[in-house]
Structures are given as C-alpha cells and as structure tokens.
Amino acid sequence: MSDFPVEQILVVPTSLFHRLGYFQGFSSEIDRYLAELFSPANISYRPRPEMEHDPSFKQLIPYVIFRHRDASGRQSVFQYTRGTGQGEGRLHRKRSVGIGGHISAVDAGADGNANPYEDGMRRELEEEVSIDSPYTSRCVGLINDDESEVGRVHLGVVHIFDVERPAVAPRETEIIECGFRGTEEILADMDGFETWSQICMRALFGR
C-alpha cells in the first residue's frame, strides 16, 4: 500500500452531461452547460486512479489556450510537447495547445470554497507556466471526445487567454519544445497533436 494519499479530483456524472445535451467534439454553447456542471449539487471529489477508468463520470478539466495577435492581425498560439513525466501517461510525447489539469479537493479548501474550479485553474497555470504579459481571458467552449480512451473520462472547458505579448514560458520541465506558432501553420501540421488540441484548433481557428 502506498504511503502517499490518493488525489481526489472533481467529477460530474456522465449522465448529467448527456441530459444537458450530448455532443462529440466542440461546443460553444457554454451557457447551456456551465451552471449545471459547476453546481455544488452535481460535483463530487473521487479517487483519481478509479476515475481514470470509469466512464460513468467526467473529470472537468480547464484547457487554457494562450493567443497573441501581432500588429498585422496574425494569430499565434502557445504550443508545446508533453514530456514523459506529466501525470496523464496516455498523452506523453503528444503536442498540445492547452494548459491545464485536474481540479483537486485541495482547491475546495477546508471551508468548502464556492469556486474550486476557478482556483484550481489558476493553481494549474501558476504551476505550469509563467505569463509575463497583460492578458484578458474568457471561456469559449467545451470539448468532449468519446472516441478515445482518455477522452471518455474527461470533459474539457476551453478558455482563451489573449496576451498582449507572446511572453509565456514553462515552469515545468515536462513542458518542452514550446513557443508561439502561427495558427495557420499548426492547422497545416496537426500530426502529433493530442485530440483535444486538434478539436480546438479546427473549431476555433479553422474557419
């Protein structure tokens, strides 16, 4: 038996997601989902090892995309390769445009913090990257991918952080081969990117 405590992560019943409106891929209808998905009545914290293989629950995962527009209007986003030391082994060595991770029971705090998702997202960002630029942020959609093993147990909440300068750098050694790259270049070279990144890039920048 391990001496380390098992991480308790935030989940919602998959049946709730189906009741609110099932989709495969990307949905921009955030008003349809977020209030119910984040309702204290619907969330719970359960052992991560069990939840990674239990499709009756969806783990809510913030997925933050950093975008920069230059003076000519050209868009670029922060992208990187996931090292082999990051937690989700099924994503090792995949390229990604999203920063984020699990919301943990520690984000709720002893006082039952009313917004553990927001605090968890900020914690993940602070752990993984430094942002040396003013920025604005907004939630733009959700990702669901039931066509992959890892996707069946996760539901992504997509945020765009618009940075004034392309000044985002890794804090984690497992975020490698990183930097801002033009959206058109990424769309033309999607091989090697994790499925969530492919879904987001095509939905948000493929038009």
Image (tube, rainbow, N blue to C red):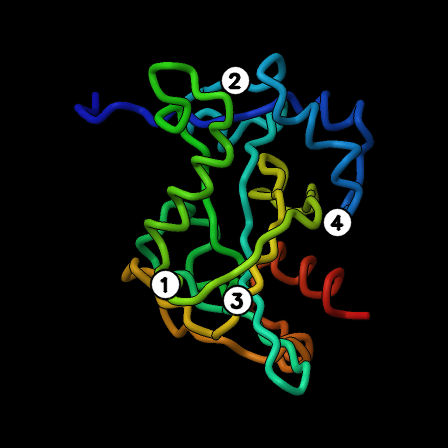
Instruction: Assign a secondary structure to mark 1.
Output: strand
Query: Which mark is first along the chain, 3 or 2?
Result: 2
- Residue 20 x/y as whole percent: 79, 26
Q: Which one is closest to the eye, mark 4 or mark 3?
A: 3
In the picture, measured across the screen, residue 28 lies left or right of residue 111, that is: right
Do the residues under discs 4 and 3 have CB atoms within 8 angstroms? Answer: no
Query: Which mark is first along the chain, 2 or 1?
Result: 2
Whether residue 28 is visible to the viewer of this picture, yes or no, is yes
Q: Which residue is mark 4?
A: 25
Q: Nearer the viewer, residue 130 or 49?
A: 130
Q: Is residue 137 above or below residue 22?
A: below
Query: Which mark is first along the chain, 1 or 3?
Result: 3
Label 3, label 1: how far apart the Cα atoms are: 19 Å
Q: Which one is closest to the eye, mark 4 or mark 2?
A: 2
Instruction: Assign a secondary structure to mark 3.
Output: strand
Q: Which residue is mark 2?
A: 44
What residue type is disc 2 on?
A: Ser
Label number found at residue 163: 3
Q: Quadrant of residue 142?
A: top right
Q: Which one is closest to the eye, mark 2 or mark 3?
A: 3
Do the residues under discs 3 and 1 have CB atoms within 8 angstroms? Answer: no
Query: Which mark is first along the chain, 1 or 4?
Result: 4
Do the residues under discs 4 and 1 have CB atoms within 8 angstroms? Answer: no
Q: Which residue is mark 1?
A: 175
Label 1, label 2: how far apart the Cα atoms are: 29 Å
